[in-house]
Amino acid sequence: MSEFSEWFHNILEEAEIIDTRYPVKGMHVWLPQGFKIRKHTLEILKTILDKDHEEVMFPLLIPEDELAKEAIHVKGFEEEVYWVTHGGLTELNKKLALRPTSETAMYPMFSLWVRNHSDLPMRYYQVVNTFRYETKHTRPLIRVREITTFKEAHTVHSSAEETEEQVKEALRIYRQFFDSLGIPYTVSKRPEWDKFPGALYTMAFDTLLPDGKTLQIGTVHNLGQTFAKTFDITYETAEGNHEYVYQTCYGLSDRVIASLIGIHGDDSGLCLPPDVAPYHVVIVPIIFKKGGEVVIDFCKKLQEKLESELNLRVYFDDRDIRAGKKYYEWEMRGIPLRLEVGPRDIENHKIVTFRRESKEKEIIDYDDTTISKTVNNLLDNISTKMREKAWKSLEDHVHHVETLEEASTTISEDGGIVTFDWCGDQECGKEIEEKVNVDILGVQADDENGICINCGKKSKHITLIAKTY
Ligand SMILES: Nc1ncnc2c1ncn2[C@@H]1O[C@H](COS(=O)(=O)NC(=O)[C@@H](N)CS)[C@@H](O)[C@H]1O
Ligand SMILES: [Mg+2]
Ligand SMILES: [Zn+2]
């Protein structure tokens, strides 16, 4: 619990995920092991998005006057924007912002692209780096100044109803994505004072890290027509008049990788979902003086079989070091499944399996015709077990309370998430945050028949609060 932050920083270094020694605060280097995890994570996300979104790429730099167009939006970001003021020795006549997010880069172009009804709906996304001069405590992958893995989707619609549908679809996409990574979450509507600058409302996914604090791992914003009016994005209707469009946008970041590491990891190090691990399987040969080449040969064949039949990423570790050292290293790097093969195993048609998530070792019958199926089932079961275990640990830390005292003792003793009835009134909400010294994450459901935990008025919502990153 308390030393989670130390564990997190140590494992990023020991498992060679990123190098935080880069000489700009809040900006880090992706190392090969970490880059592989990021790559496989993005492959899963893009496969889901590519079903009905188009991937694009916009410039990094945003002219000052475009950024400033949407007053509430720029107010929300003005303290976080990095500026480019020179080109070489020449001072630019117009400052350029490094995108903190790309609404003001994209929407002037959407205004050119949207002509008539048949152009809609549009669903674009890009995966880029964005820059935010975070003044709160920066943390690798969690609160960085260069958000290296910022997936932002931006959609354009001809009606408010369609944007509501798109918000629901975005929530479904995010549930599917987080479920494939075994990351548990709560979904809630952010309070008015904590929504995305310029949005009508913000839906947020929060997960719970082992130190009892929640992390916002994804957000979906209904932008209404606010940006359409600011950037004059209109379409010509069949009757020939011009209507403003309706928009949504939804974002994810490096925090997804942080959650993978923080939630599934344990005292032996990383524990990675098979679909994003650098390798699904590592094969460790047990070699004594004699019989070495028989084992090596067997392992190479097994590697080829798993690679060709299951399209798995398999590492055959034939380095000349003690098996125990290999076990330690691959467990620390979070490789989901290890296969150990010695000369006697081959004679007895056996093979030893080690599941990283449960740390169970098993001697199973080896049969050329069934090993692929066995390995595939093991990997599927490992994914399922990891997701179930993570959901259980989240659910074990969500408590419903009836009084503010109960709320603050629960949070201070157990961390985690507390739910209660709230009237929804901003004043009252701010008072609750004061009294319990936590953040209101958001409202989860409407609950007309409760009474507000703080002011006693009719409650409107089941509300979530927690200590947050
Ligand atoms: N400094 C940061 N470091 C890492 N992740 C961040 C940081 N700031 C925000 N995020 C993540 O990025 C997600 C999207 O950011 S956002 O401001 O909420 N939304 C947008 O920028 C919208 N334009 C989404 S397309 C957040 O939900 C959060 O998970
Ligand atoms: Mg921020
Ligand atoms: Zn109240």
Image (cartoon, helix red, strand yellow):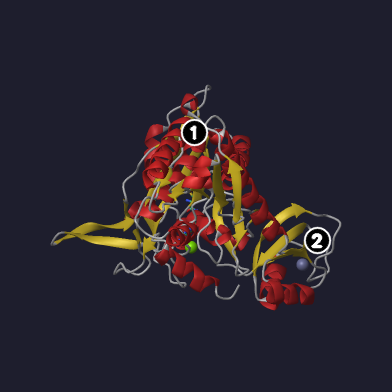
- Residue for badge 2: 459
**Would residue 208 be found to the left or right of residue 333 on screen?**
right
Where on the picture, by quarter, is residue 422?
bottom right
- Residue for badge 1: 310
Q: Earlier in the sequence, mark 1 or mark 2?
A: 1
**Would residue 441 be found to the left or right of residue 126 on screen?**
right
Cβ of mark 2 under 8 A from ligand 3: yes
Foreground of the two, 412 or 87: 412
Where on the picture, by quarter, is residue 3?
bottom right
The quarter of the rendered structure image containing the N terminus is: bottom right
Rendered view: 43 above or below 158: below
Q: Residues within 10 Å of mark 1 (few under 14, many from 20)?
A: few
User: Which amino acid, by three-letter code, is at mark 1?
Assistant: Leu
Frontmost of labels 1 and 2 is 1
Q: Secondary structure at mark 2?
A: loop
Q: Furthest residue to the top?
A: 238
Q: Furthest residue to the front?
A: 290
User: Which amino acid, by three-letter code, is at mark 2?
Assistant: Ser
Rendered view: 424 above or below 110: below
Foreground of the two, 103 or 262: 262
Alpha carbon of mark 1 to alpha carbon of mark 2: how far? 53 Å
Name the residue: 43% across, 31% down.
Answer: 308
